[in-house]
Image (tube, rainbow, N blue to C red):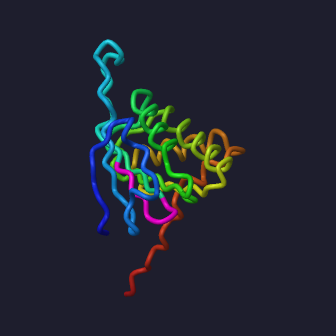
Amino acid sequence: MSGRTELLDREALRVDAASRGAEGSTLAVSPPRRGDAHRRPGTRELACVQLTVEQTTAVLAPYGNIDISSVPDLVFVAGALPEEVTEVVWDLRHVRFMDSAGLHLLMNQRKDCRIAGRGLRVRGLRDQPMRLVELIADLRPWEPWLEFLEPAAPRCSSAR
């Protein structure tokens, strides 16, 4: 991909279609640092969100934990997507830990994407986030949690 990569602040995040190349852009978004007075003790802020826009698909790839301290920045980035985006993909392969705030993020993103007429996919769930989604799917089977799990790859049987 011959896009561009930049570090952006909240004001610079909104990218219009005219400023992107025909092949899209990759934006590494580092949210502005909050002062220590605004941080909960023991929390770490999200290090980075990589946002890649290719034609009508946006891929958001957060790095770090998804918890109450990082969700506002993730919501902001997702809310700043160009209008022409018709599919949102959350690539969570760099997320090792997610708590209930991450579950709320996923469910709210599902709702927001439906309202905006966008598709939503989640990929790359690692062990702990995947177990959390599976647990909430077992506890609340009437909610669409299983939509966030990738279909299991077919297992190849070994020939003997």
Check the picture and name the quadrant holding the C terminus. bottom left
Image point (44%, 79%), residue name: 157
Outermost residue to the bottom:
160
- Residue at 44% of width from left, 56% of height from top? 59
56 in magenta: yes
Q: Residue 16, position in %: x, y?
A: 45, 52
Side of 123 where 144 appears, left or right: right
Left of 148 or right of it: where is 144?
A: right
The one nearer the camera, 66 or 127, is 66
Front residue (pair 63, 77): 77
Q: Is residue 51 above or below residue 1?
A: above
Q: Quadrant of residue 37?
A: top left
Q: Residue at x 36, y 53 (%)?
A: 93
Closest to the observer, 5 or 156: 5
Q: Nearer the viewer, residue 68 or 139?
A: 68
Start-end of magenta stretch: 50-57
* Quadrant of the frame with the N terminus: bottom left
Tell me the quarter of the picture where residue 107 sits: top right
- Identify the image quadrant of residue 68: top left
Q: Is residue 125 above or below residue 98?
A: below
Q: Residue furthest right?
A: 142
The percent position of residue 28, horizontal first and vertical second, equals 31, 48
